[in-house]
Image: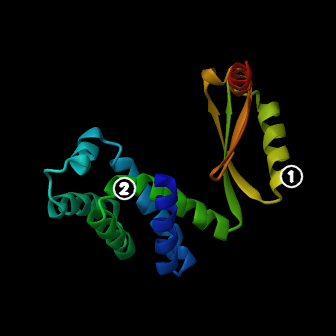
């Protein structure tokens, strides 16, 4: 549910920022803000009902000044705080980034495997993904031992799980 809400905020922000160059710059600024929110003290401050909206906003504006956040981004912060959704900034930033990528005809893809893929295998996977998508893609490779084997491919917000972990979970559910 919160990702749907985040996408709505991102879409509204994207409409406000009509210039593609400004949208691309704002994407980076929002990502910096989202990374700053990963600090547990800042996150707990935003979640604390005793902290007023004005106090939350002043703290976020201080972080925004360091990130060089554009006026549209500052307005987004104001709206998120006013609606009690400041902690969604990371998801809004991700959704906004996906919209900017889509407008440029580029997709964000994450490939997760149980072990680091050999260079030849990673190149083969990258080539095949680009063929299937028919578009340019920024492909990031990750390692997660819990996958056990196979691949988990995330394209934007869609997930294609062809891992052994997923197959075992389906088998457990069927039994």
Rendering colour mode: rainbow
User: Is residue 7 or residue 156 the one in the foreground?
Assistant: 7
Real-space CA distance between mark 2 and mark 1, rounded to the nearest whole angstrom: 34 Å
Asked where in the image residue 113 lies, by quadrant, the reply is: top right
Q: Is residue 115 visible?
A: no
Name the residue at 44% across, 55% down.
31
Mark 2, residue position = 33
Vertical order, 50 against 39 (above or below): below
Counting from the top left corner in percent of width and height, residue 161 is at 71, 36
Q: Earlier in the sequence, mark 2 or mark 1?
A: 2
Name the residue at 37% across, 56% down.
33
Q: Is residue 158 left or right of residue 90?
A: right
Counting from the top left corner in percent of width and height, residue 68 is at 34, 65
User: Is residue 116 or residue 14 the one in the foreground?
Assistant: 14
Where disc 1 sits, the SS reads: helix
Q: Is residue 11 left or right of residue 173?
A: left
Counting from the top left corner in percent of width and height, residue 123 is at 80, 39
Circle on res. 131? 1
Vertical order, 76 against 160 (above or below): below
Circle on res. 116? none
Counting from the top left corner in percent of width and height, residue 134 is at 83, 59
Q: Residues within 10 Å of mark 1 (few under 14, many from 20)?
A: few
Q: Is residue 41 left or right of residue 87?
A: left
Where disc 2 sits, the SS reads: helix
Q: Is residue 24 left or right of residue 73?
A: right
Name the residue at 77% across, 35% down.
122
């Amino acid at each position: 549910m919160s990702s749907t809400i985040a996408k709505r905020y991102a879409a509204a922000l994207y409409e406000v920022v009509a210039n593609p160059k400004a949208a691309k710059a704002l994407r980076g600024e929002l990502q910096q803000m989202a990374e700053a929110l990963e600090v547990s003290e800042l996150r707990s401050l935003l979640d604390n009902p005793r902290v007023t909206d004005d106090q939350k906003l002043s703290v976020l504006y201080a972080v925004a000044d360091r990130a060089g956040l554009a006026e549209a981004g500052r307005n987004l912060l104001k709206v998120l705080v006013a609606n009690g959704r400041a902690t969604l900034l990371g998801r809004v930033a991700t959704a906004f980034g996906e919209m900017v990528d889509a407008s440029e005809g580029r997709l964000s893809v994450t490939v997760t495997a149980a072990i680091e893929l050999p260079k030849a295998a990673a190149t083969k996977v990258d080539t095949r993904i680009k063929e299937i998508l028919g578009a340019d893609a920024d492909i990031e490779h990750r390692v997660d031992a819990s996958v056990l084997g196979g691949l988990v491919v995330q394209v934007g917000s869609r997930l294609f799980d062809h891992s052994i972990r997923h197959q075992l979970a389906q088998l457990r559910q069927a039994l």
